[in-house]
Structure formats: C-alpha cells, structure tokens
Image: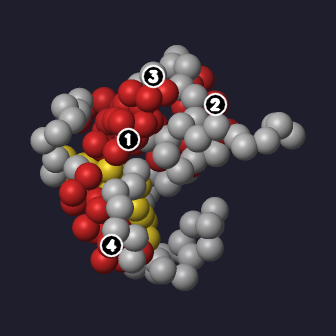
C-alpha cells in the first residue's frame, strides 16, 4: 500500500521526494503503512473552491481531509474486510496558505505540511526519527498542562 502524492499547484516550489519521505515517516509513526492515502497539494484558489463546496466556507485554508470511511471516529483505524478497502482517503494541503503561515512564523514549509493535524506526540516522534526540531504551527492558547 502506498501514498499517492500530487502537486496541482505551481505557486510554491515543493520537494516532492522530501514530502513523500515525511508522509511515509508519519505513516510509520501512526502504524498505518498498510493503508493507501492520497495527498494533494493545491493553491489558495483551488482549496478555497473545495472549502466552499464541502464546508460552505468561502476562504482558503491549510488542510481539508476526505476520509474513505465517513463514520470512523477520530483516532480509530478502520477494519476493512477486502483489500481494496485499505484506504484512508485524501488530504488536500493548501500549500500557498501554509507557506504564508510559515513565513509569518519563520517555520519550515515541508515540515509544516506533514504536521498540520497531528498531536505533540507525533511531532516529537517525527523530530526524534528525522533529527529535525519542528514545532506546531498552532500555538496553545493557554498554559500547557
């Protein structure tokens, strides 16, 4: 099983090989290597269109996910019966939107693209396995507990 990585935008130069390695590392950390996953990189115009159609929000955003299993609870993995059901779905990354966030916060774009919806544990494991020192894009609102 694998990752389908598509770059449908031309605004931000991406290193596809690094992004693929980072996504594969996250799949390993999460224990989801046996599942297929689509990662589609898009510009502000396209993610705004998708956001408008599916969420009724006429604005660009950083990430939109479309799970293969609609009734799956967060944090749970599906138990597919057939091999062709080993699919988690698609993730659309608003690369242009994320790049602007990274520039404002002086963050690494490629690291940010693979960390958008993950907990501190995953970020810590990713840093440990890759030797990087990435931080979350979103800062906590209050004191950490």
Q: Earlier in the sequence, mark 3 or mark 2?
A: 3
Residue tagged by mark 4? 52
Q: Is residue 75 visible?
A: yes
Q: Quadrant of the C terminus?
A: top right
Q: Quadrant of residue 64?
A: bottom left
- As drawn, 32 above or below 115: below
| Front label number (1 vs 2) | 1
Residues under numbered marks 3 and 4 in contact, where contact means CB atoms less than 8 Å apart? no
Instruction: Determine the CA span between mark 3 and mark 2.
Output: 19 Å
Residue tagged by mark 3? 106
Give how far across and how far down residue 46 sits, in percent. Answer: 22, 60
Q: Earlier in the sequence, mark 2 or mark 4?
A: 4
Q: Earlier in the sequence, mark 3 or mark 4?
A: 4
Q: Secondary structure at mark 2?
A: helix
| Front label number (2 vs 4) | 4
Instruction: Determine the CA span between mark 3 and mark 1.
Output: 12 Å
Residue tagged by mark 2? 124
Indicate which disc residue 2 carries. none
- Residue at far right of view: 145
- As drawn, 6 above or below 73: above
Looking at the picture, tell me which residue is in the foreground, 48 or 9: 48
Give how far across and how far down residue 44 sits, in percent. Answer: 26, 52
**Residue located 31% across and 30% down the image:** 18
Residue tagged by mark 1? 98
């Amino acid at each position: 099983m694998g990752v389908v990585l598509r770059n449908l935008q031309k605004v931000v130069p991406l290193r596809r090989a690094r992004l693929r390695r980072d996504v594969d590392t996250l799949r390993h950390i999460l224990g989801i290597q046996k599942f297929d996953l689509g990662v589609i990189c898009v510009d502000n115009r396209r993610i705004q269109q998708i956001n408008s159609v599916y969420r009724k929000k006429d604005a660009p955003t950083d990430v939109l996910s479309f799970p293969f299993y609609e009734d799956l609870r967060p944090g749970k993995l599906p138990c597919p019966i057939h091999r062709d059901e080993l699919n988690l779905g698609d993730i659309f990354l608003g690369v242009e939107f994320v790049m602007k966030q990274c520039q404002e916060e002086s963050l690494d774009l490629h690291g940010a693209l693979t960390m958008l919806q993950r907990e501190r544990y995953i970020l810590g494991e990713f840093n440990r396995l890759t030797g990087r020192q990435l931080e979350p894009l979103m800062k906590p609102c209050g004191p950490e507990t």
